[in-house]
Every structure is written in structure tokens, then in C-alpha cells.
Image: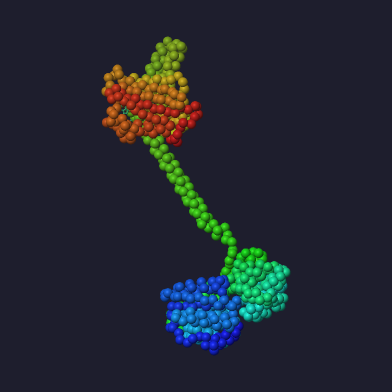
């Protein structure tokens, strides 16, 4: 092919179409000359590569781009016209480097450069190694990295993926370039001759080609570089012809150009046009920087890679595992992970945060429970200590209360002894004496039982009980003390049963505390006015217990502080009784409050929720 263009150039020179005299070449101006038309996909990709590589240089490079529009326009007259046009166009602004894209663009420039752009170095891109091999060596200042159309590699790959294939169909066109590809294809397929039968569809009309490929079976593979002109003279660009072939074919189609991916071909060993463009651009950069073309160290050939269209891999049932890991795969529908990566990450993150939050909350709850249980334990210990303290205060009266029945027992026993000694003992009288002894004994042991119940370090219990009984117990426990202090202690109970749920000893303790405080407040009250009254009152939902005294009362200033820990106005007071009382009452779901008219006494009111027997008003302290 290059010979034809050479002829054109000689013609141009001899015609004197190129005028001598040139402006100086600009070191920042690159002319890119494409062989075909502007929108050929290979050109679009190549242009992108050239532009990006030139853009990486420190200098600002001006890029001019021209398209020879082969093979639609050709012939000596056309070449002459283009040459004149380019000469005039760039006369005032000649390029510092020319990049030619494609075999025929290289030919064009080689044949016209002496007249058009003498001494301007030329970089070739997208030129086949086989094309260079078929012609004399290039001048020293014409450099580039050729690509190798790996037809043999593509055929081998196709037969590997279709082991059942028995036929290989090769298709090329009728243009000069197509004929070169035909030779390449023939050479490449020689090695497979024994394994498959080879059918060469070269220079046939497109209609015939399409008819033939529509008859093929799955025991056939098609390999084609496409073509520029068919046997009927119709002009195509390779990618267009391949698209038509792949759409009509009933067998898988393979090809050697990256731009074929997406037309329906399965794939092939291909060199990226963009990579070719980049390589050309970076060589141009070095030339513009002043490096001599003959000193450049360049690779022998552009690397190629296996490119595939994943949809075709699936369509033809090719084993996905047989696709090498380094293959360039296009049109693979992203998996769930790729498609929803962000969403999945967000969900996973939310899940993780939620789990962490949950763990933190559980940990916090656990800590709170531990804290609660130690608070309960301290409260329990404190309540017990406070009961011991009360018992300490009651020692005198309790001793008296036990002594009384013991003394009575002693005197009854002495009386019975005398009766027996005198021989005047009558069985009836002795029986009465023994009954008195038993009653006194029961009285003493009842005092001890109550005291033991109060002082025992029992675990907190939940029972239902009648508040009347609690008040009765308190009166019984404190009666002796009240008598000792010359105080009238009385209780106003009610006939109905008022059931509350909780720990009876704790409620007893609360009331003992209130009564002891009331008795303390009566110390300076005239004897005839010293009285403490416990009263009980029931309502639909609860029970109210009041402890009223006629003591010195509480000042307005002290009233709000009563239930604070360690608030006391007594010389030997500790100030914990009322704060413990409030804790215990609240643990039973109740409330406690104080009111007073100073000088006239105080009233402490406890409200507790009332339950049906076995009810559930107990709220804590376990
Ligand atoms: P303490 O008895 O050790 O002082 P409390 O917490 O039981 O601790 O009582 C706190 C204070 O409340 C008492 O010091 C007293 O000033 C006041 N108080 C309690 N009950 C009465 C009452 N019935 N009349 C007057 N003051 C009272």
C-alpha cells in the first residue's frame, strides 16, 4: 500500500505543487494526522491518548488535528489537494512534531514531508509491525512503537474457549488495507489448519457475508478484523462491518481491535488505541524537549491484552473460570456487592453501631443493676443498724417489760410452794396459779419474739399483710417505753382489713422511728398532755397512717430538711431515722410527709398503696 502513496508524493514534487520556503517550526505545536475520518472510534480513543500525554508536559502544547478520510477519499488528485491545503494552512505556523496515526497516514507524510514539513520529526502511532516490516527502514527522524495485530493469538484463544469448534471462518474485505489483513490472517491461521477446516471469506459483498455467517453452527468460530470496502464496493469502517457480521452470525465472532468490544464480538488479543496514542504523545514530548529521535530508546512493540465482552462470554456458554484473571473485561454486570457497596456498607455500619449501642445499653443496665443491688444492700444494712440503735434506746423499757412477767412468775411460784408446804393446797387454786405462770411466761416470750423479729438481720421479704397488725405490733413494742416516759401511746385502728404488700419489719421500723421521735418531742411537755396517737385510715387505693404528737413541733425552717440524711436537732441524734424511713416508704410505692404548728406538735403522714391480698404494689428493696 505504501508504494501507491509514494507514487503520489513523487507526482506532487515533480508538479512543483509544494512551494519552497518555510517559517520556522514551532516547538510547542504538534500536528496530528489521522488516516481515517474524525469519528472512527479508534481515532477518538487515539486522540484522547495523544492529548492526555501532551497535556502532561510542562509546556503548553498547541495541537492541530487533521483527518485524511481514507479510504472514502483517495487518489492522486485528492492527495495533491490535501497536500496543498496543509502546506498553505501551516505555512505560517509549521508544527515542531508530526504525529501520524495509521499506516496510510505514515505513508502520506513520508511521501510529502520533504515538501510539506522538511526536517520536522515524525512519530507514528497505530502502525502495524507487519506493515513496517514490508517496507524499507524508516528515516532516523521517523519513530514510533508499532502494534502487532495478534491474529494468531486471537484464533488460539477462540479455539480454546470453543473446544468443540471444527470450522474457522476468516473474513476480510476488498480494499487494499483489507487485502493486507487477508494475508496476515492467512499466515496466522496456518498453524491451526490440522485442527479446524478454514474458510476464507475475502472481498465478498456484505450481503453474501451476512448470509453465510447466518448459516454457521456452534461448531464454528469467526475471526475478522472487519473491512473498509466490501466486494460490492461499499465503503465501511471496520467496526461497522464487524457489528453487522456479529449481529448476523450464528457462531461466536472474534476480532483484533479494542473498538470491536460492544459490537457483538466475544473479544480477542488487542492493543488499546488510547495506549497507542499516549505512547505517541509521550514520544512527541521528548522530541519537543530537544531529544534527538535517533537517541530515543523505544519498545519494539505495543503490549497487547486479552479483551472480552462479558455478555458474549455468557451468551456462548464460555466457562468463566477459563477467562484469565488479567483479561480486560467489559460489560460485566456488577454483582450485588459492587452495585450496592455503599448501601451495604451503610447498613452494615448502622447494624454495627446499633449492636454497639445495644451492647453499651446492656452493659449500662448490668452496671445499674449492680449499683442498685449494692444500694439495696447498703439500705438494708443501714435499716438494720438503725433498728439496733432503736433497740439500744429501748433496752430499759424492754428489760422492765420482761422483768414484770418474770417477777409475777416468781411470786406465783413462791405462792404455790407455800400452799403445798402448808398442805392447804387446793387443786383449783394451784391450777389458777399455774395458768397465771403460763400467761406471764407467754407475755415475756412474746416481748422477746417481737424484739427478735425486729432485730434479726432478715432478708427483705415481700408479703401481703394487714396494716392493723403492724400498728398493733408497734404499740406492743413501744408501750413499755411510753409508760417509762409517762406518755399515753394509743392507736386508732380500723375494723376492715387494710392489705398492703411489702416487708412488714421495714414498715414496723418506720413507725417505731416516728413514734420514738414523737416521744422525744414530748420530753418538755407537761405530763398530762403527753400523748402520741397512731391512726390508720383506708381509702379505695391506699392507706394513710398518721403519727401525731403534742410535742414542741418543727419550725418552718427545719421542716424542708427533715428527711435529709444527717439532719438532726438532738444532742445525741444522728439524723438518719427519717431519711431511712422515706427510703423504705418509697420502696413500698408510698410517700411520707411532715406538718407541724410549732409549739403544738407534729403530724407525720404515710401513704401506702393498698392491694388486694397477694397484690403487686411492692416496687423495690429486693
Ligand atoms: P434523729 O432522731 O437522729 O435526729 P431523725 O431523722 O429521726 O434523726 O429526725 C431528724 C430531726 O427531725 C430530729 O432531730 C428533729 O429535729 C426532727 N423531728 C423528727 N420528728 C419530730 C417530731 N415528732 N417533732 C419534732 N421534731 C421532729
Could you tell me which residue is drawn at 28 percent across and 21 percent down?
525
Taking the spot 30% from the left edge, 24% from the top edge, the residue there is: 597
Q: Is residue 407 above or below residue 75?
A: above
Q: Give the image quarter of residue 451.
A: top left
Which residue does the image show at 41% across and 29% down from the upper left?
507
Which corner quadrant holds the N terminus? bottom right
Q: Indicate the quadrant where residue 216 lies.
A: bottom right
**Residue 510 found in image quarter:** top left
Between 277 and 437, the residue placed more toward the observer is 277
- Which residue is at a point 66% across and 78% down the rendered structure image? 174
Q: Nearer the viewer, residue 248 or 305?
A: 248
The C terminus: image quadrant: top left
Image region (quadrant) for ligand 1:
top left
Question: Residue 270: where, in percent of width, then height?
Answer: 59, 73
Residue 198 location (% of width, % of height): 70, 76
Residue 22 visible? The answer is yes
Q: Is residue 410 visible?
A: no
Task: Identify whether 101 is placed above or below 454.
Answer: below
Horizontal arrangement in the rendering, residue 460 relative to residue 178 (left or right): left
Foreground residue among 11 and 394: 11
Residue 424 in the image: state x and y as whole percent: 42, 10
Amino acid at each position: 500500500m505504501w508504494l501507491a502513496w509514494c507514487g503520489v508524493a513523487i507526482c506532487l514534487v515533480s508538479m512543483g505543487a509544494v512551494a519552497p520556503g518555510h517559517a520556522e517550526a514551532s516547538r510547542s505545536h504538534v500536528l496530528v494526522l489521522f488516516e481515517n475520518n474524525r469519528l472512527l472510534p479508534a481515532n477518538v480513543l487515539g486522540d484522547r491518548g495523544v492529548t492526555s500525554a501532551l497535556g502532561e508536559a510542562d509546556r503548553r502544547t498547541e495541537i492541530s488535528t487533521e483527518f485524511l478520510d481514507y479510504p472514502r477519499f483517495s487518489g492522486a488528485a485528492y492527495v495533491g489537494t490535501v497536500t496543498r491545503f496543509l502546506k498553505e494552512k501551516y505555512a505560517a505556523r509549521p508544527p515542531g512534531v508530526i504525529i501520524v496515526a495509521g499506516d496510510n497516514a505514515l505513508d502520506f507524510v513520508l511521501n510529502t514531508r520533504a515538501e510539506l514539513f522538511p526536517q520536522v520529526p515524525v512519530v507514528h502511532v497505530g502502525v502495524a509491525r507487519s506493515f513496517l516490516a514490508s517496507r524499507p527502514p524508516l528515516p532516523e527522524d521517523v519513530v514510533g512503537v508499532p502494534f502487532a495485530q495478534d491474529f494468531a493469538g486471537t484464533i488460539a484463544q477462540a479455539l480454546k474457549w470453543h473446544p468443540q469448534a471444527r470450522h474457522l471462518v476468516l473474513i476480510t474485505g476488498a480494499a487494499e488495507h483489507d487485502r493486507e489483513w487477508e494475508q496476515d490472517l492467512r499466515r496466522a491461521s496456518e498453524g491451526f489448519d490440522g485442527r479446524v477446516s478454514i474458510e476464507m471469506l475475502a472481498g465478498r459483498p456484505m450481503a453474501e457475508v451476512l448470509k453465510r455467517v447466518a448459516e454457521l453452527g456452534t461448531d464454528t468460530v469467526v475471526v475478522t478484523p472487519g473491512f473498509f470496502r466490501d466486494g460490492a464496493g461499499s465503503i465501511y469502517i471496520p467496526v461497522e462491518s464487524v457489528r453487522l457480521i456479529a449481529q448476523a452470525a450464528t457462531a461466536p465472532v472474534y476480532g483484533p481491535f479494542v473498538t470491536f468490544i460492544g459490537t457483538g464480538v466475544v473479544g480477542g488479543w488487542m492493543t488499546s488505541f488510547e495506549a497507542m496514542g499516549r505512547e505517541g504523545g509521550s514520544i512527541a514530548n521528548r522530541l519537543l524537549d530537544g531529544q534527538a529521535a535517533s537517541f530515543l530508546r523505544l519498545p519494539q512493540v505495543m503490549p497487547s491484552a486479552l479483551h472480552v465482552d462479558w455478555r458474549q462470554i455468557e451468551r456462548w456458554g464460555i466457562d468463566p473460570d477459563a477467562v484469565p484473571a488479567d483479561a480486560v473485561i467489559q460489560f460485566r454486570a456488577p454483582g450485588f456487592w459492587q452495585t450496592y457497596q455503599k448501601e451495604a456498607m451503610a447498613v452494615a455500619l448502622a447494624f454495627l453501631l446499633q449492636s454497639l449501642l445495644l451492647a453499651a445499653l446492656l452493659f449500662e443496665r448490668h452496671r445499674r443493676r449492680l449499683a442498685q443491688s449494692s444500694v439495696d444492700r447498703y439500705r438494708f444494712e443501714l435499716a438494720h443498724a438503725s433498728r439496733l440503735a432503736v433497740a439500744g434506746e429501748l433496752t430499759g423499757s424492754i428489760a422492765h417489760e420482761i422483768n414484770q412477767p418474770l417477777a409475777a412468775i416468781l411470786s406465783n411460784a413462791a405462792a404455790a410452794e407455800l400452799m403445798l408446804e402448808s398442805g392447804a393446797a387446793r387443786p383449783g387454786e394451784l391450777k389458777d396459779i399455774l395458768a397465771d405462770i403460763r400467761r406471764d411466761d407467754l407475755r415475756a416470750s412474746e416481748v422477746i419474739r417481737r424484739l427478735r423479729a425486729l432485730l434479726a438481720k432478715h432478708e427483705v421479704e415481700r408479703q401481703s399483710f394487714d396494716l392493723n397488725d403492724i400498728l398493733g405490733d408497734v404499740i406492743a413494742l413501744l408501750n413499755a417505753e411510753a409508760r417509762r416516759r409517762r406518755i399515753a401511746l394509743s392507736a386508732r385502728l380500723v375494723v376492715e382489713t387494710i392489705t398492703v404488700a411489702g416487708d412488714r419489719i421495714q414498715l414496723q421500723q418506720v413507725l417505731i422511728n416516728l413514734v420514738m421521735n414523737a416521744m422525744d418531742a414530748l420530753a418538755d411537755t407537761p405530763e398530762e398532755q403527753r400523748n402520741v396517737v397512731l391512726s390508720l385510715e383506708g381509702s379505695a387505693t391506699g392507706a394513710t397512717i398518721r403519727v401525731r404528737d403534742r410535742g414542741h413541733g418543727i419550725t418552718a425552717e427545719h421542716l424542708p430538711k427533715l428527711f435529709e440524711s444527717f439532719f438532726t436537732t438532738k444532742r445525741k441524734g444522728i439524723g438518719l431515722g427519717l431519711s431511712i424511713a422515706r427510703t423504705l416508704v418509697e420502696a413500698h410505692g408510698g410517700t411520707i410527709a411532715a406538718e407541724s404548728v410549732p409549739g403544738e406538735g407534729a403530724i407525720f403522714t404515710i401513704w401506702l398503696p393498698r392491694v388486694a391480698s397477694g397484690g403487686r404494689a411492692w416496687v423495690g428493696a429486693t
